[in-house]
Amino acid sequence: MRVALLGPVRAYADDGSPIDIGGARQRAFLARLALSAGQVVPAGSLVDALWGEHLPADAVRC
């Protein structure tokens, strides 16, 4: 899988075909993970990246 982060966030399968990654929140999630490729990303870091100060009631903060 290849993830393009410059410009619109996009993902491509190994054969080069595009992968539909959904809406803005899914693209932000994928981008955050791609920026830390090969590393463990704590749940709290993901929550902060996706919602910042405006957490939904069911968000997990670690």
Image (cartoon, helix red, strand yellow):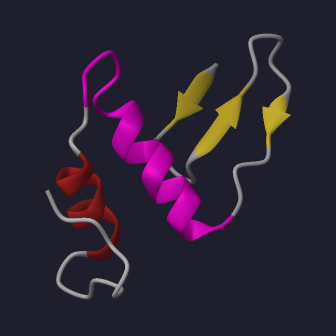
- The location of residue 39, given as percent across then percent down, is 25, 21
- The location of residue 10, given as percent across then percent down, is 63, 43
At x 43% / y 45%, what residue is drawn?
Answer: 31
- The location of residue 21, given as percent across then percent down, is 70, 50
Left-right relation of 22 to 59:
right
Q: Which residues are magenta?
A: 23-40
- Asked whether residue 37 is drawn in magenta, I would say yes
- The location of residue 2, given as percent across then percent down, is 60, 22
Left-right relation of 12 to 18:
left
At x 28% / y 83%, what residue is drawn?
Answer: 55
Count of labels in the image: 0
- Asked whether residue 52 is drawn in magenta, I would say no
User: Could you say which is closer to the camera, residue 40 or residue 23?
Assistant: 40
Residue 36 placement: quadrant: top left
Q: Is 24 drawn above or below residue 11 in the view shown?
A: below
Q: Quadrant of the C terminus?
A: bottom left
Residue 33 placement: quadrant: top left
At x 72% / y 28%, what residue is drawn?
Answer: 12
Left-right relation of 7 to 58:
right
- Name the chief secondary structure element in magenta: helix
